[in-house]
């Protein structure tokens, strides 16, 4: 009999989220009882172990959607007897960093409240924690790693130092064969075949750049021989595909023509082959080669640089040497450990016995300690902010809905570390030009499923712990990060339970004249319209086809599935084919983040850069703005 994935998660998610999540938005607001006080959290509340639909989980988005889609919010609020020095909206990395910077500057007695609509803190930096066979197995629910931390600004690097994060140790603690951190390590390509997937071993991501036995890898692919010839020529740089163009025209071409158009028109590939080459773009950036310029596609890791004549050859050598210094650092639960370290610094009572970096992975947090009136810093979950306004020279009112209750707190300052797109609804008093700028970007939707397996025997037979599956619903599969950082003990071998991370991008290819922002909106709606059952079926089908030939049986081997859906994922950054070159200081994110009296704007959206260091820097900027005034 199949070990079905339970809906405990789903039900628990409802219980710890707003109890009204099955109610239509209008009904939900009609129920608000302004006399109720804030709700307490029980000692068993521990969202990292919830499975099923996570990320933007049921209960987290309904209130915000009622506001953004229908302009609905409660008419009355219960004013709590709570006044803070700083109220932060959003407890992702940016909001947490802002709270930390503020506290560092203003001292430990500064009264800070963080509000977040999710049932867990961290924003995209979420932890998935499984327990099976007497072991704890961790997975990352969103933001993965510290990318090139040596290049972080002094602000972002300083925060890592405050948290005791040792990136050298992190580099040493991760298994060498973890391909998401080590480009030299094996990573395979798998295509559906009539008896299950055909997996081609080797190093696909480097083969695409003409390295290693790229010809052998291509010849093993189940694609037509003449298509293989074209791939070999492309990867090896046998041909200059732009040889009819002058140097200047080449530059124009690579910055104004889409990467996919280049593959079809210049390389002569058929449409069916393109997903093999742009899979890395779909997962890395969130959309296909049709929405990247040639230059952006190649910069994102897709092949073709060597086919640009001598310029390409030269740049390729430079890129190869730069790649050798490329460094990413992983915690076992991704950047959730950074969020946890921040929360632990701000509210030590969540884990009084924890020391910090050395045992962060294994520390179980007491969520009941997050929001206690004896603590100067408080973090309140399941709380969606619906209105923020400065009501006199020195005070800001913040309205929010928690568990169906409409509540109000006040603060001397407010930092909006939430989504740019929602801010015009929270602060309708902002200037029209600023509101328009805030609405410009569309966040990039992504889905990360973590699948707990009874053991890793079948997966280990693939000979690579990263597999590109270009034709499947989940485009890339990897083991969860096998690292000992933070005191974690990763699976000791194939007999131990393991977690497979399965990554998907819902954003479709353009069918006509849609801009990338139109497509991102379609991708976002697709996420909301896809049920957990559908994802579960996709996971089972894909894993069975990939691993069945190695003895895998999805009915017995899959022990839990957590689908982390991020309809509002990466911050939007500007793309050459869609966005103009804005004059200095006039890009939408720069106009949008202007300080508005006692309200400042943080979040990675305000930097137009979907990275942790951007989120941290945004938090710093917002705190600096607010602390320059009394
Ligand atoms: C799948 C995925 C993978 C990623 N991988 C990486 C990576 O490997 N490395 C990297 O550097 N970056 C990565 N990122 C980028 C990531 O977004 C940033 O690194 C960073 O975590 C963003 O933090 P933030 O605080 O700016 O935003 P968020 O993490 O989005 O936090 C904002 C919080 O505010 C909440 N909020 C919004 N509106 C309201 C409201 N009205 N009331 C209350 N709360 C509200 C949100 O729900 C959220 O919890 C990834 C992102 C995604 C989605």
Image (cartoon, rainbow, N blue to C red):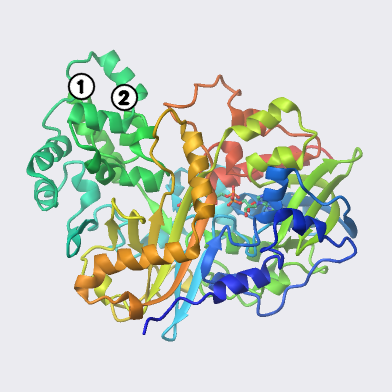
How dense is the environment of label 1, judged by Cα within 10 Å: few (below 14), some, or many (20 and up)? some
Looking at the rendered structure, the secondary structure element under dot 1 is: loop
Quarter of the picture holding the C terminus:
top right
Q: Position of residue 248 (x, y in %)?
A: 29, 14
> Would you say residue 624 is visible in this rendering?
no
Q: Position of residue 411 (x, y in %)?
A: 84, 50
Q: Position of residue 342 (x, y in %)?
A: 62, 60
Image point 80% across, 44% down: which residue?
388
Image point 22% across, 24% down: which residue?
311
> Is residue 616 positioned above or below 334 on the image?
above
Q: Position of residue 475 (x, y in %)?
A: 34, 53
The quarter of the picture where residue 394 lies is: top right
Looking at the rendered structure, the secondary structure element under dot 2 is: helix
Residue 242 is marked as 1
Q: Does the CB distance between marks 1 and 2 fall below 8 Å?
A: yes
Quarter of the picture holding the N terminus:
bottom left
The quarter of the picture where residue 267 lies is: top left
- Give the mark count: 2
Q: Is residue 12 left or right of residue 499?
A: right
Image point 43% across, 27% down: which residue?
513
> Is residue 83 positioned above or below 574 on the image?
below
177 vs 29, nearest the viewer: 29
Q: Cα distance, mark 1 to mark 2? A: 10 Å
6 vs 48, nearest the viewer: 6
> Would you say residue 246 is visible in this rendering?
yes
How dense is the environment of label 2, judged by Cα within 10 Å: few (below 14), some, or many (20 and up)? many
The quarter of the picture where residue 135 lies is: bottom left
Residue 254 is marked as 2
């Amino acid at each position: 009999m199949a070990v079905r994935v339970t809906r405990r998660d789903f039900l628990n998610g409802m219980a710890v989220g707003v109890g009204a999540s099955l109610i239509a938005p209008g009904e939900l607001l009609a129920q608000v009882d302004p006399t109720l006080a804030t709700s307490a959290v029980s000692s068993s509340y521990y969202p990292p172990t919830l499975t099923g639909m996570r990320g933007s989980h049921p209960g987290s988005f309904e209130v915000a959607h009622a506001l953004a889609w229908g302009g609905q919010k409660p008419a009355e609020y219960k004013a709590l007897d709570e006044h803070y020095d700083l109220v932060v909206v959003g407890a992702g990395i940016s909001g947490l960093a802002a709270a930390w910077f503020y506290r560092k500057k203003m001292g430990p007695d500064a009264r800070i409240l963080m509000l977040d609509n999710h049932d867990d803190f961290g924003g995209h930096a979420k932890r998935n924690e499984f327990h099976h066979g007497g072991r704890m197995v961790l997975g990352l629910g969103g933001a993965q790693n510290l990318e090139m931390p040596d290049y972080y600004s002094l602000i972002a690097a300083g925060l890592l130092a405050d948290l005791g994060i040792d990136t050298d140790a992190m580099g040493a603690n991760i298994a060498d064969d973890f391909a998401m951190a080590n480009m030299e390590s094996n990573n395979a390509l798998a295509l559906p075949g009539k008896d299950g997937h055909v997996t081609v071993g080797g190093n696909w991501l480097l083969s695409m750049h003409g390295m290693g036995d790229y010809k052998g890898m291509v010849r093993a692919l189940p694609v037509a021989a003449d298509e293989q010839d074209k791939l070999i020529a492309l990867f090896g740089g046998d041909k200059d595909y732009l040889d009819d163009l002058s140097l200047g025209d080449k530059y124009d071409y690579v910055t104004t023509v889409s990467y996919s158009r280049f593959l079809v028109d210049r390389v002569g590939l058929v449409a069916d082959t393109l997903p093999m080459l742009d899979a890395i773009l779909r997962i890395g950036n969130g959309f296909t080669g049709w929405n990247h310029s040639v230059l952006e596609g190649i910069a994102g890791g897709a092949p073709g640089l060597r086919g640009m004549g001598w310029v390409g050859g030269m740049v390729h050598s430079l890129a190869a040497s730069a790649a050798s210094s490329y460094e990413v650092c992983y915690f076992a639960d991704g950047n959730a450990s950074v969020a946890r370290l921040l929360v632990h610094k701000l509210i030590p009572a969540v884990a009084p016995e924890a020391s910090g970096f050395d045992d962060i992975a294994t520390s179980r947090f007491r969520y009941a300690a997050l929001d206690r009136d004896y603590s100067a810093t408080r973090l309140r979950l399941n709380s969606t902010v619906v209105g923020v306004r400065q009501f006199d020279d020195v005070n800001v009112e913040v309205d929010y809905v928690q568990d169906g209750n409409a509540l109000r707190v006040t603060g001397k300052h407010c930092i909006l570390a939430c989504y740019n797109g929602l801010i015009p609804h929270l602060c309708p008093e902002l200037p029209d030009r600023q509101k328009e700028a805030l609405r410009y970007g569309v966040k990039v939707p992504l889905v990360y499923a973590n699948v707990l397996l009874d053991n890793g025997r079948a997966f280990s037979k693939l000979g690579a712990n990263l597999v590109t599956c270009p034709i499947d619903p989940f485009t890339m599969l990897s083991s969860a990060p096998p690292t000992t950082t933070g005191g974690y003990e990763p699976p000791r071998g194939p007999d131990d339970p393991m977690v497979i991370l399965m990554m998907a991008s819902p954003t479709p290819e353009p069918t006509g004249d849609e801009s990338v922002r139109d497509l991102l909106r379609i991708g976002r709606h697709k996420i909301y319209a896809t049920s957990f059952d559908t994802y579960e079926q996709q996971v089972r089908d894909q894993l069975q086809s990939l691993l069945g030939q190695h003895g895998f049986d999805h009915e017995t081997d899959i022990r839990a599935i957590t689908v982390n859906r991020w309809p509002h994922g990466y911050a939007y950054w500007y793309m050459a084919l869609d966005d103009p070159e804005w004059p200095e200081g006039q890009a939408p994110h720069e106009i949008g983040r202007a300080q508005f009296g006692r309200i400042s704007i943080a979040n990675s959206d305000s930097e137009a850069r979907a990275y942790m260091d951007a989120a941290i820097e945004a938090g710093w900027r917002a705190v600096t703005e607010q602390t320059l005034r009394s």
